[in-house]
Every structure is written in structure tokens, then in C-alpha cells.
Amino acid sequence: MSSLHHRHLAVSPDWLALYYRHPLEITHGEGRHVWDADGNRYLDFFGGILTTMTAHALPEVTKAVSEQAGRILHSSTLYLNRPMIELAERVASLSGIPDARVFFTTSGTEANDTALLLATTYRRSNQILAMRNSYHGRSFSAVSITGNNAWSPTSLSPLQTLYVHGGVRTRGPYAHLSDADFTAGCVADLEDLLGHTRTPAALIAEPIQGVGGFTSPPDGLYGAFREVLNRHGVLWISDEVQTGWGRSGEHFWGWQAHAQNGPPDILTFAKGIGNGMSIGGVVARAEVMNCLDANSISTFGGSPVTMAAGLANLSYLLEHDLQGNARRVGGLLIERLRAIGAASERVREVRGRGLMIGIELVRPGTDEADPEAAAAVLEAAREGGLLIGKGGGHNTSVLRIAPPLSLAIPEAEEGAEILADALRAVG
């Protein structure tokens, strides 16, 4: 055990997880690569949990941070803040929500917390619909709507949460159905659920479930849900903390794959927009955002430094068409990984869109999740010079691949080959 690991254990909670048998200290990065304290270089296919969205040490972002830090680090939302207003204007325009208002937070957890506050206040209801296998953050309210028991440490809750089926396409009672019948079954289940309860405030859903293992429903499911929700006056919150900013390649926001009945009422975002800086936020139509009848501010949300980083990062993303790069390079990477998976008895499925890819592992000859194999492949990939993540539903058995959106084709091919070797090493 390294001395730093020993010091970590001495001062950190037992539940603060670390990857790897011998945890990694990352000291610096550049582009799609990072280095550890021993000088080892790694291709980064996880980006600090989908947070380093464009590139490590992106000059445009580091320059913006440095220049803003040289002017003023902090003021709070009690004062006019030019970088915050400029980023809010851009996010509001990009959101697709009419008459949008934007409130910045410091994390996705806090963004979802705020969305729940808005929805329950606006609807005067503490009932929330959430998806099975979902994850929305680590706060008391966010844990209470998380449908993944590995990330739900308490059953106590300020909310009454009802879980809807549909976020996982290839497991569960409807897995054998066609996409159209799957959607119809989930909509019928939602209709039935609403017949047995008081009217909920909102449905919160990740268009592609992140911690749950990059699972998703057929396109259009949440749009079909929206017809039902509208009839009952229930709001739709799209949790875009992991799916936003073009990572899926096909769409800028995940909700756009379900847009036949319009945009969500509330959209939450975080992670990639700051490229490592702490930015989260909520977008909602003005009627919903303005429903609070008491004072509220954010001490650190909308910090001048993080807003400067977000502006520079978003500009780089759009000017270099990183959404298009995610579609092109991600498409090639998924096909390469599917070919690799076809040769392994452990790979049940390779799924995802753009540069948001999951490889689900099972025990050979069964359909049972194999978390031990996932942990072993994670270790073997590191030995080969590749950093990936893991997640999943009933068990942690999905390898999560989410590199910076500037990933080049040779890097995608290199990462795929390392993963192939790691799978072969595990057997």
C-alpha cells in the first residue's frame, strides 16, 4: 500500500470508493491521456466520470480560467456576473426549452435537487416518478429517487417515489418484445400506475442511464410517456448530467431522441460543460423556474471562474463539431467493440451511442451478471495503459467507456485493442 493510499484511508469515509487494487494517483493530463505519480501514461476512456468532455489541459479552457482568476475568483449570485449571464444565454438557447431560465449549481446532484424542489413546489406534490436502474446523485433527495440499490444507502426519503419500467431495453419482463411493443407496454404500465396513486409532481429520467450501465429505451419512449404525463399535468425532468452536450453523437441532448411531443419542462446538466470545473445547472421554462416564493441564491453556483471555463469549453465543442466527432469515431469504436465482444463468451452486449458505450459482462454460458469479471477487466485494461469505468444494475458488471469527445480514430483503435487483450486475459 502506498503512503498516499494509507493517508487516504486514515481520513476518508469507508464508503468513499477507489478504483483498482493499487489505487491510482493521476498527476497531469494532456489531450486524451493522463499520467500517474510513477510516470505511467494512460489513454483515458472515462474522463473523470464523463467530465473531461473536450480534452485534458485544453489550452482554451486553461487560458480562460487563468485570466478570470487574475481578475476575480468569486462574487456570488448576489451581484451581476457577466460570464454567468453569457453562459446562461447560450445554454438557454441550446436547451430547446421555450422562455427558458437557467440556474447554475456546483454539481449534477445539486442540479437534480433543485429540479425536484421546483417540480414539487410547482405541482404541490411530493410524489416523483423515476426509472428503475436510475441514478440521480448522492444527496438525500437524489438518493431517494435513485432506482439502483448499489447507490441507495437509505430507504428514508422526503419524497414518495414510484418506479416506472422502460430504462433498460434488453433485460426485464418486456425485453423479448419489439421496440414498438416494448414502448406500448411501458406506456400501458405508466397509465396503470397513475391510476393507483395521487398525481405525481414529475417524472425524472436519464435518456441514457449512466451509472446503470449506459442502458436506454427505444427512441421515442419518453415522448410517448409525455402524452400520458401531459394529460395528468405531470412535469418531465430530463437528467442530462451524462448525456448532454453531444456525447451521444446523434443528438446534442438525450431528450431529443424522444422529442415527438416537445422538450422537457426541466433539464438538468453538469459534468462535461466545465471540462473538470464544478458546474451544474437547471433549465426550466419561466413559469416553472419562477414558482418559488422565498429567497434563494447560490454561493458558489455561477462562479466567475467556472463560468469562464464553461464558456470557453462550450465554444470549443461547438466550433470543432465534437458532437459530429463523437458520432463518427464513436460509431467506429462501437462496431470494433462489438466484433471483439462477439469473440468472448463473457460479453453479453455492447451498447451505447456516440462516445457513451457499455460492455455488459456475464458468467460464460449464463445470463448472470459477473461483477468480478468487470473488476478484473478494469485491472487488466489499466495494466495495458487504458482507463475505463464500470457500472450496472443488479450487479456492477458493465464496463463504461466515455472518452473525451475529441478522441481520434487511432486512439479509438488503440483503446479497443487494449480492451480486447484485457478480455482475453480474464478468459
Image (tube, rainbow, N blue to C red):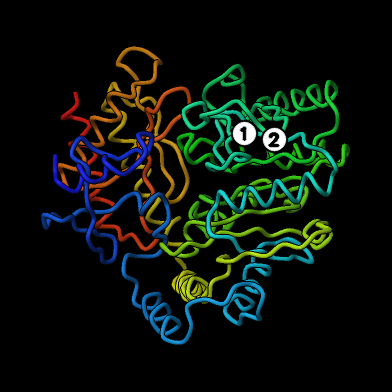
Viewer-nearest residue: 82 or 163? 82
For label 2, count other residues whose C-alpha is less than 10 Å away and answer few (under 14), some (14-19) or many (20+).
few
Q: Could you tell me how many numbered marks the image carries? A: 2
Q: Residue furthest front?
A: 10
Q: Residue 272 at what x, y percent from top left?
A: 47, 59
Element on which disc 2 rests = loop
Q: Is residue 336 above or below residue 144?
A: below
The reply to whether discs 1 and 2 touch (Cβ–Cβ < 8 Å) is yes
Q: Residue 397 at what x, y percent from top left?
A: 37, 27
Q: How far apart are marks 1 and 2 (CA)?
A: 8 Å
Q: In this view, does 384 lie to the left or right of 219?
A: left
Q: Mark 2 points at which residue?
A: 158
* Residue at (74, 48) in percent of width and height: 260
Q: Is residue 245 left or right of residue 378?
A: right
* Residue at (24, 57) in percent of width and height: 410
Q: Residue 262 at what x, y percent from top left?
A: 76, 52
Which picture quadrant has residue 32?
bottom left
- Of mark 1 and mark 2, the one earlier in the sequence is 1
Q: In this view, does 25 lie to the left or right of 224?
A: left
The kind of residue tagged 1 is Ser
In front: mark 1 or mark 2? 2
Viewer-nearest residue: 192 or 7? 7
Q: In which quarter of the image is the N terminus?
A: top left
The kind of residue tagged 2 is Pro
Q: Residue furthest top?
A: 365
Viewer-nearest residue: 399 or 338? 399
The disc label shown at residue 144, or none? 1
Q: In this view, does 144 lie to the left or right of 17?
A: right
Q: Residue 185 at what x, y percent from top left?
A: 71, 23
Q: Which residue lies furthest to the bottom in this view?
A: 71
Element on which disc 1 rests = loop
For label 1, count other residues whose C-alpha is less than 10 Å away and answer few (under 14), some (14-19) or many (20+).
many
